[in-house]
Image (cartoon, rainbow, N blue to C red):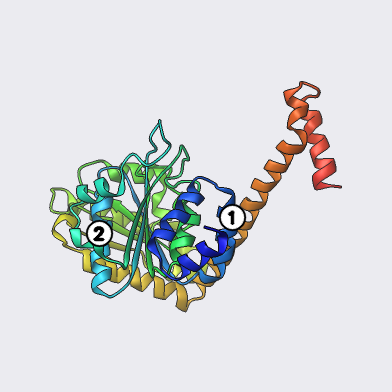
Amino acid sequence: MNVSDFIDGITAGNRRVLAKAISLVENEHPLAKEILRGVYGRTGRAQIIGITGFPGTGKSTIVSKLVEEFRKREKSVGVVAVDPSSPFTGGALLGDRVRLEGADVSKDLWIDAKVFFRSMGSRGRVGGIAKKTGEVVKLLDAGGYEVIFVETVGAGQSEVGIMEIADTIVVVLMPETGDDIQVNKAGILEIGDIFVINKSDLEGAENVERWLKYMLSLDETIQSADKEVAKWQKRVIRTVATKGIGIKELADAICEHFEFLKLNGILKAKRAEKAKLMAIELAIEDIKAEILKRYGNLLEENASDPYAVAEKIVKELIKP
């Protein structure tokens, strides 16, 4: 297949072509960049929702139930689930089927043409997402999926990478695990738009909710200098995802947040900022490759020292 075949297939909603394109992106194949460039004009229509939180809180089950809920609302849904990587292959330790079976998802989702699941290995990247997660989301967006969930790896405190991708961030907690202390340490309060207390049928859920609401009342972003951002009242929702309790309310809050972003011009501004950051990251990647190509041999042959090479790079590439 050539680049045009991929672009036509993705934008026509061909799931097999989409899956192949995702593999090319994950493996940093030479065609990947051209495919992404070709579909970029078809992106920007989906709502991207990050689901993050500590291990064991039930993020996968929540995502699965949300997929069912949004399908009831006749939305097409994409899911990118980031897992720890296999030390042998670099791929996701949990395959799609294992993940879904573990989340007790209806088997009907497997044959639903409006649902697309993909697991990604984190490949050692910190921040809860993989290096190519954002680009995979772009492919799903171009493929016409209206709602896209990104489930982070579940590593805990450092999961702020999702801010680079998502429009709406849902932070999942649960009672009796010390999540309150962990969140306090991590500063996750700042990144969440919606907070979910899952497994809320367990003892202690009331205390977690009370503590969370108190902490949010002290959240400095509520008194933010950005008055538009400050208008969003962060939600706290209790769920028992295995029983579907609270899922409808969570889906409603996700939709409300998206409308809030659009109505206040925040969505447009955030996406413009992300596009700028993306352009800078791509430029840095190209510059790194060019530096290695031009100057790598100087160090490999011990013909110079890193300081001299750095000065040479700046002089010749940055300040020609």
Q: CA distance from mark 1 to mark 2?
A: 29 Å
Q: Identity of the amino acid at label 2?
A: Trp
Q: Position of residue 145 (x, y in %)?
A: 39, 68
Q: How many marks?
A: 2
In this view, the residue farthest toward the front is 1
Identify the residue under disc 1: 33
**Residue count near mark 2 (Cα–Cα under 10 Å), binned few <14, some 14–19, many ≥20:** some
| Residue closest to the eye, 7 or 95 | 7
Q: Secondary structure at mark 2?
A: helix
**Residue count near mark 1 (Cα–Cα under 10 Å), binned few <14, some 14–19, many ≥20:** some
Q: Position of residue 293 (x, y in %)?
A: 73, 38
Label disc, if present, on residue 110 of the rendered structure: 2
Q: Which comes before the other along the chain, label 1 or label 2?
A: 1
Can residue 179 be spotted in the picture? yes
Residue ID at (73%, 39%): 291
In the figure, 85 relative to 164: above or below? above
Q: Position of residue 316 (x, y in %)?
A: 84, 42
In the figure, 219 relative to 72: above or below? above
Q: Identity of the amino acid at label 1?
A: Lys
In this view, the residue farthest toward the bottom is 263
Can residue 163 be spotted in the picture? no
Q: Quadrant of residue 51?
A: bottom left
Q: Position of residue 11 (x, y in %)?
A: 47, 69
Residue ID at (35%, 46%): 183
In this view, the residue farthest toward the right is 320
Q: Secondary structure at mark 1?
A: helix
In the figure, 66 relative to 202: above or below? below
| Residue closest to the eye, 182 or 112 | 112
User: With 267 as the anchor, is 47 left or right in this view?
Assistant: left
Q: Are marks 1 and 2 in contact (CB under 8 Å)?
A: no
Q: Quadrant of residue 244?
A: bottom left
Residue ID at (25%, 62%): 111
